[in-house]
Image: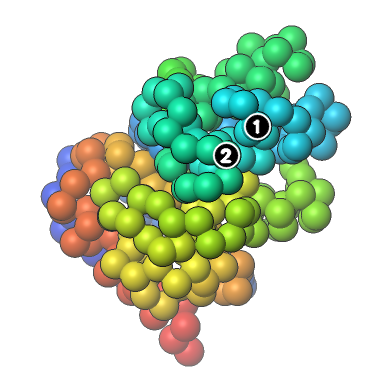
Amino acid sequence: MEALQRLADWPVDNVSAAILAPGLPLATYGDVDRVYPLASVTKLLVAQAVLVAVEEGALELEDLAGPPGATVTHLLAHASGLAFDSRDVAAAPGMQRIYSSAGYEVLAETVERETGIVFAEYLAQAVAEPLGMSRTALVGPAGHGASSSVADLARFAADLLAPQLLSAQTAQAARSVQFPGLDGFVPGYGKFRPNDWGLGPEIKGHKATHWTAPDHSPTTFGHFGQAGTFLWVDPERRAAAVVLTDRPFGAWAKSLWSGFNQEVLAELSSP
């Protein structure tokens, strides 16, 4: 894809990428086996492992977890009321969309307690190994501590497009808005009214000035990370993209990511 060649001009030392689209071979750029820190893209992997645990019967989405009155669903959807980077309670469950990495640490601990398996190992067994993601590992906190490669995340994105790890019902719930109407902040992009979120992924909805493209469908879901990383899936186009870099997110990314994603969509739409 020609859009991928634009990555050569990005102000980063290393960048790797992949585009998945129907009827097209996997399009890639850079070293797809290079391992990068994922930062908050980690949350997509952690959420998937939590949902596998739910389908295995180790826990339920409505099980209480985190602050009083909060459930696994609240934690996955950043609606538990936990603060961004601590376990302080900033709101009642279900009242605000407070993006919380701490909430994902609570989720990991919940899975550990209910399965008796260290969460990093559970993530490997539940997600990485079945999808052949040999370069993916959780090496730090569950909110932002995984590392992976584009080749691995392309396999993960393919599973998000055509779910095998999860049932169709659970996969649909994961990419559906949980607690509709909640306002909240997307770190680095400001406040959105509403700030739609699923069971792990951010959902684009009708957000403007966003890291996805203006022409992405409202059902587009995914995540970006402060390590300069992102993954999106557009179910209506049956397309997905993974981009990993070695430069932390900042003004450079805000000026380039949405434009790059728009070029990708334009190219996918051209005859």
Taking the view exactly as shown, the residue that stands out farthest to the bottom is 271
Task: Give the answer, above or below, for where 240 lies relative to 259.
Answer: above
Residue contact between numbered discs 2 and 1, judged by CB atoms under 8 Å: yes
Task: Give the answer, above or below, for where 163 lies relative to 124.
Answer: below
Residue at (52%, 23%) from the top-left corner? 105
Judge left or right: residue 150 versus residue 108. Answer: left
Determine the image quadrant of residue 31. top left
> Which class describes the residues within 10 Å of circle 2: few (<14), some (14-19), or many (20+)?
many
Mark sitting on residue 47: none
> Which class describes the residues within 10 Å of circle 1: few (<14), some (14-19), or many (20+)?
some
Judge left or right: residue 78 versus residue 236. Answer: left
Determine the image quadrant of residue 176. bottom right
Earlier in the chain: of badge 2 and badge 1, it is: 1
Residue at (68%, 21%) from the top-left corner? 111
Name which residue type carries label 1.
Gly
Residue 154 locus on image (x, y percent): 53, 49
Residue 114 locus on image (x, y percent): 75, 17
Q: Nearer the viewer, residue 37 or 99?
A: 99
Residue at (76%, 16%) from the top-left corner? 115
**Which quadrant would the N terminus be assigned to in this image?**
bottom left
Q: Nearer the viewer, residue 11 or 208?
A: 208
Tag 1 residue: 69
Circle 2: element type: loop
- The CA distance from mark 2 to mark 1 is 6 Å
Residue at (85%, 29%) from the top-left corner? 57
Tag 2 residue: 93
Residue 120 locus on image (x, y percent): 58, 18
- Residue 94 shows up from this direction: yes
Judge left or right: residue 214 versus residue 72. Answer: left
Name which residue type carries label 2.
Pro
